[in-house]
Amino acid sequence: MAIIDKIKAKAKSDVKHIVLPEGEESRNAQAAIIIAREGLAKLTLLGDPEKVRAAAGDPLEGIEIIDPAKSEKCAEYASTLYELRKAKGMTEEKAAELVRDPMYYGVMMVKCGDADGLVSGAIHSTGDMLRPALQIIKSKPGIKTVSSCFLMECPNKDYGENGVLIFADCAVNPEPDAEALANIALGAADSARSLAGIEPKVAMLSFSTKGSAKHDMVTKVQEATRIAKEMAPELALDGELQLDAALVESVGQLKAPGSTVAGHANTLVFPDLGAGNIGYKLVQRLAGAEAYGPILQGIAKPCNDLSRGCSVEDIVATVAITAAQAQG
Ligand code: ACO
């Protein structure tokens, strides 16, 4: 069974409530009909009900529509937002204005427990989608840095766990320091368990294996490896490893003898966003892998971003992933 079908089955087994702030956008509204029909999630679409229905084309049976401009919840959300952000300069007037924006209204629904997760980004940039989620929902206890992963399913089943791998961070933190990189590694391990259903073997990637090269960028990955091991001593995690040492058994044995990860890694932690973002796209385009994401990890409640070029099917898949994450 394809990994996305396993995730959809998981989503259906314990249905969660997901909010789509971009309800007036046609791909979101059309995806909602499929999600409701397949029973992947309970849905709320945000927007002017007339515009949402027009965007869907077909009847939106069993799907809630809320217009943030007219919602009676606005006062409660504005007061909560003001309390959460007043130390950062938020005023009561600004909070009242912001909660009428569907992005903020959706994030407040999740924050206040009125929805289990959020999916947005078909018409918002990654930064505009992430900022309210980071400011309001914040990271999980014990994790400082929210990051992202891609769930990769490769046609070549020789690598990772039968061709399935987690790549992180590919979308959020441009230049993580050693501590942030260790947080990314722990978030990725969590994603491997909760989404891919695999026991993580985490490789901290570099252009050096076990000190074969000397550079500040190598030192950062070595330090991140040390911090991650301190934070999660039971986790199978090793570094710094070159990609071939992480994935290919013979190279792993040669370059990192005795490592429990080298040659068998299924969770790849890239040293920065340049490497991670380029890396997942190389594997997607040149190796023909399915790439699901970016999936936020390390955040207290699931919120996921869509690409502006996303298809209706991409939105359906992202809602299923978000619903599966909401199960914990
Ligand atoms: N983890 C936890 N909290 C964070 C993080 C993080 N990684 N980043 C920012 N925050 C918090 C800050 O602490 C701050 O909280 P506060 O206001 O309570 O103090 C809040 O979020 C806002 O932080 P800013 O620094 O003001 O936000 P910034 O403008 O830097 O935006 C963002 C953060 C959006 C994540 C930024 O780093 C970014 O744009 N990243 C790259 C996104 C991108 O373009 N990705 C590539 C495309 S995606 C793709 O190709 C699939």
Image (tube, rainbow, N blue to C red):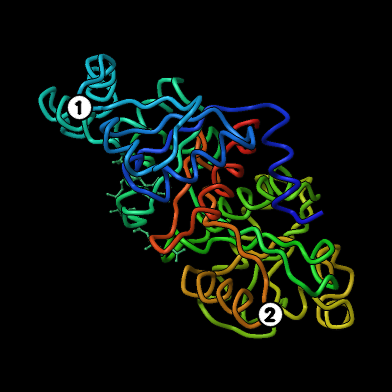
Residue plotted at (82% across, 54% down)? 1
- 42 vs 135, left or right, is right
Q: Pinpoint residue 79: horizontal percent, then vertical percent.
A: 23, 17
- Residue 174 versus residue 21 in the image, above or below: below
- 163 vs 122, left or right, is right
Circle nearer the N terminus (2, 1): 1
Quarter holding the C terminus is top right
Q: Residues within 10 Å of mark 2 (few under 14, many from 20)?
A: few
What is the C-alpha distance between the residues marked 2 and 1? 46 Å
Q: Pinpoint residue 8: horizontal percent, then vertical percent.
A: 69, 42
Q: Amino acid at mark 2?
A: Ala
Kindly tell me whether mark 2's CB lies below 8 Å from ligand 1. Answer: no
- 230 vs 253, left or right, is left
Q: Hey, which quadrant is residue 152 in on the image?
A: bottom right
Q: Nearer the viewer, residue 237 or 269?
A: 269
Label annotation for residue 287:
2
Residue plotted at (62% across, 76% down)? 206
Label annotation for residue 69:
1
Q: Residues within 10 Å of mark 1 (few under 14, many from 20)?
A: some
Q: Amino acid at mark 1?
A: Ala
